[in-house]
Amino acid sequence: MTSLLPDELWLDIFDLAVEDADLFDYSLPTALSEASWFKTLYGDWSLRTAQEGVNNNQRRSYATKKAIMSTCRTWRRLGYEFFYRFLFFSNPRNLQRACAMMDRDKDLGWWTKRIHITRYFAGGGTTMETTQNSLVSIIRHCPNLQIFIVNWPLSNTLQAIGDALCTFCPRTLRVLHINVPTTSLPKLIFMLEYLPKLVTAHIEFDGTPPEHINLGAAADLALTLPSLRHLSLRGPFQDFLEEAIGWNMPSLRALCLDFVNHRDDFPDLIEFLKMHGAELTHLDLNIIPTLDVPTILDLCPLLVTFTFNPDWRIPDWEHRSYSQSSVVRRPHANITTIGLHHLLYAFGVGYAATYDKVDPFATQMIRRRNDINFAALNRRNFPRLERIRVLNTTLLSDLEANNGPSQQCYERWERWWRQCQKEGVRLEDCTGETLGTLPMDPEDGDEDTESVVDEGGTQQHLSSLRELLMECRKMNAQREMDVTPPALWMIYAGGSSRLS
């Protein structure tokens, strides 16, 4: 069969079969990216985040690529391009295997455009030094690397990995996702100076920031990042943001800030937005300390998407009714989507239900803030508003476990629904479904029919892939004994048949 088709046609078929085109997009999942329900091994419903969904897609794509590579010599020869154009590791030992294989065949890294190393459990049969050396060697073999994602902290390895990225792929790297110690801020700044083509940067800061960081020569650097469109910061990022106020980022359009559970020493966001907010279209603020929303919205007139924490204490909130709000000074003309973080106390489920018994006064105060802030999300303040999305996955899981809001909070649920219906605004949860659409087992009635309808499009989409894999199995049964190349056996070694 392989002799009847030209290589170019096989390459097009493989490109459709591996389904990895989305993995080379320069964007990263955000708070607005949709989660999805799935059944755990124990039969319970759980939420899968957008990032976990991306990881599953990478594993699924690898399985298809391995089937292609193991079918026949022709498919193996053509499949190298697809097998190595992204590298996904969840086992540090596989870094060493891939490194050894790239050292033997230095042309393999030419295809690699994406490297993603996800979190793994400690141990894994390797040391941090060995893992670092393997990763640096792999980067050295990838001159066309565009996307670099590492989900574990680069505590003692930032210097070596940063040097490798700035040396071997400074003009090609477009996406950077790393986790660094707060004390490594000077190294991070120097690293960014030599990556001028970055389009997306997600930086997580780990550890407690010192009272004073000696930036040395990095303090005098006025970085210019001409291509940076999306900046995402997580953790105690205050020192980084203060430094970035004076940088030149003319293309910045999206800013995502997640301060996690930190409450003190929040940086001067207003000053940052005075310098960089005029062109922003996406602003995500997952922050516990209250911020000045009216001023923020005035500084960002082009915002289309805005997320904030409705637990915030708005000015003079104790004396305001639901119809009054100071969330804007003037109607914002462009916002179409508003995302809501937190809201754990709004519906009386999960941890909030327990805390309500311990401190009912504090709970009621937070719920009143929720009501006043939500009431401000209307067409009078946001004339182009189309959707409001509740972003907290923990809240949605608690609602599913409780089969909806508590009895005492059901009135709030209905009031918010009536407001959105009156305004013509869609109220969604973090899966993109309307708030209140909880997962149901097929035996629960009409859901069976809906599931069949939903899966129909997917089944049709995958039919060609199934036919291709069936052909793979047929040819696999007849292939020569020496089909699998030594390079692949190195990756499969150690009792594992997966690179990831």
Image (cartoon, rainbow, N blue to C red):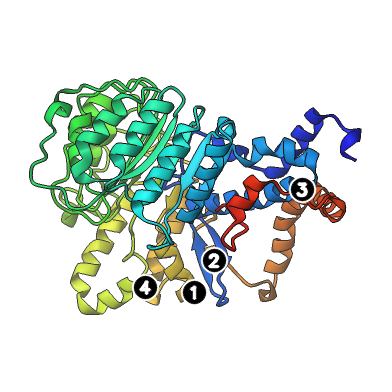
Question: Which mark lies nearer to you, 1 or 3?
Answer: 3
> Callout 1 environment at 10 Å: few (<14), some (14 to 19), or many (20+)?
few
- Which percent across, then down, holds residue 206? 25, 50
Find the distance from the CA under tag 1 to the CA under tag 2: 8 Å
- Which quarter of the image is occupied by the N terminus? top right
Q: Are marks 1 and 3 in contact (CB under 8 Å)?
A: no
Q: Secondary structure at mark 1?
A: loop
Q: Are marks 1 and 2 in contact (CB under 8 Å)?
A: yes
Q: Is residue 500 left or right of residue 72?
A: left
Which residue in the protein does label 4 denote?
A: 350
Find the distance from the CA under tag 2 to the CA under tag 4: 16 Å
Q: Secondary structure at mark 2?
A: loop
Residue 403 is marked as 1
Q: Could you tell me the amino acid type at mark 3?
A: Val
Find the distance from the CA under tag 1 to the CA under tag 4: 11 Å
Which is nearer the eye, 487 or 398? Answer: 487
First in residue order: circle 2 vs circle 3? 2
Find the distance from the CA under tag 2 to the CA under tag 3: 48 Å
* Residue located 27% across and 26% down the image: 276
* Residue located 45% across and 54% down the image: 92
Which residue in the protein does label 3 denote?
A: 483
Which is nearer the eye, 447 or 371? Answer: 447
Tell me, yes or no, if residue 475 can be seen here.
Answer: yes
Which residue in the protein does label 2 denote?
A: 438
